[in-house]
Amino acid sequence: MAVPHPHKQLHAVPFEQRAPTRTRVDRLLSLDAFRGIAVAGMILVNNPGSWDDVYAPLRHSAWNGWTVADLLFPFFLFIVGVAVTLSLAPDPKRPQSWQPIFFKVVRRAALIFALGVFLNGFPRFDWSTLRIPGVLQRIALCYFAASVVVMTLEVKEQVIVTVLLLVGYWTLMQLTSIAFPDGPETNFAAQVDDALLHGHLLHDGWDPEGLVTTIPAIATTLSGVLCGFWLVSARRPAERVAGLLVAGNLALLIGSIANQLWPINKSLWSASYVVFTSGMALNVLGVCDWLIDLKGYRRWATPFVVFGTNPIVAYVLSSLLTKVMLLWTIARPDGSTIDLERYIFDGVFSSSRNPAAASLAYALAYVGLWLGITGFLYRHRVVIKI
């Protein structure tokens, strides 16, 4: 990713000329709620009581197609894009030089990336086989790329970059003889990732968060950036919500049509997947905005706002605790051992009559545990910024 051009200052194009803005950027509670929905959903999907017994909507699609689980990660990247725009809104206290802002972005992206590598390596840190890509790593790369685009380009140019990323990625995959494979190991993206990161991928020969598929994931984040400009523009709340819903349903239509050319596919992060999930994100954010910020129905959103206030902390620590529980073994009366996670599931939640319901009950309880922890931070106004 190129750094800002030496002859083009970060604020050479004043923010006010990029989009009409309100006198201040109001903090929309719906943004925190939407972020919290994505984080709570990711924790829920990643922590079933038993991976053998999971309801279909909570499983990732095996290849083409989508489930509810496949919407959560792009939702989070979308809201990262929105946050990038809001963080660059007019602020008289912000220095006008681009260097402090740019290096702050680099520092934050590096920290998030390092946290992802730490999670992958914990606790043994075998560097010979440690997985390099990951969810947090992709968030870091997309956040950095989107920030540079916002800092250096006007809104119209940002739209062009978003379209070029999708069209370029689609063309790149089309020009290869294995653009639409029946499995994840034989496509162009997997081949490049395996060549560059052989032995450091989630699976043998491919990774769902690989380098090449991060290109369209940046487009997902930029779609959130563009949404952010709509949110800070000088429009009435009802008009703001209507715009979100109209754009969201239009994106769903385009994504569904594009699905006929290149199937919706999370592992490849296909162009149709980007447009379709961005449409879903716009609709969910629009509904949240309508319910919370326009109608004032806020009580139902409180748990999600709690998660949305410390999202990275909730995701990292919940993932870390799961790994600790898998390492912590307990001796059974017959002399065998069992990990703590399985011990709790078997002792409290396991049900032979409905294994999937028991598995979901464990996942919900785990989400509830982290709601309590993040709720404690929320009540004490502790926001851990990463």
Image (cartoon, rainbow, N blue to C red):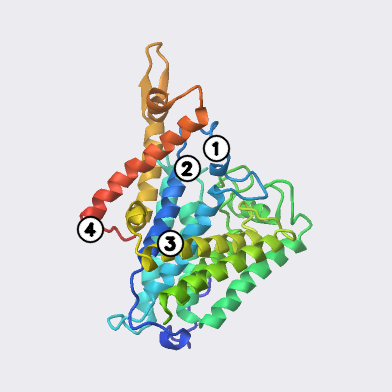
Sequence-earlier tag: 4 or 2: 2
Count every numbered label the image shows and give the total: 4
Residue with the mark numbered 1: 55
Instruction: Give the Cα separation between the discs numbered 4 and 1.
Output: 36 Å
Q: Is residue 228 visible?
A: no
Sequence-earlier tag: 4 or 1: 1
* Label 1 vs label 3, nearer the camera: 3
SS class of the residue under badge 1?
loop
Residue count near mark 2 (Cα–Cα under 10 Å), binned few <14, some 14–19, many ≥20: some
Identified at 47% across, 58% down, the residue is 76
Above-or-below relation of 90 to 187: below
* Label 4 vs label 1, nearer the camera: 1
- Horizontal and vertical percent position of residue 112: 40, 58
Identified at 39% across, 25% down, the residue is 343
Sequence-earlier tag: 4 or 3: 3
Farthest-out residue, left: 380
Instruction: Give the Cα separation between the discs numbered 1 and 2.
Output: 13 Å
SS class of the residue under badge 3?
helix
Q: Three-letter amino acid code at disc 3? A: Cys
Residue with the mark numbered 3: 288
Sequence-earlier tag: 1 or 3: 1
Q: Three-letter amino acid code at disc 4? A: Arg
* Label 3 vs label 2, nearer the camera: 3
Residue 381's disc number: 4
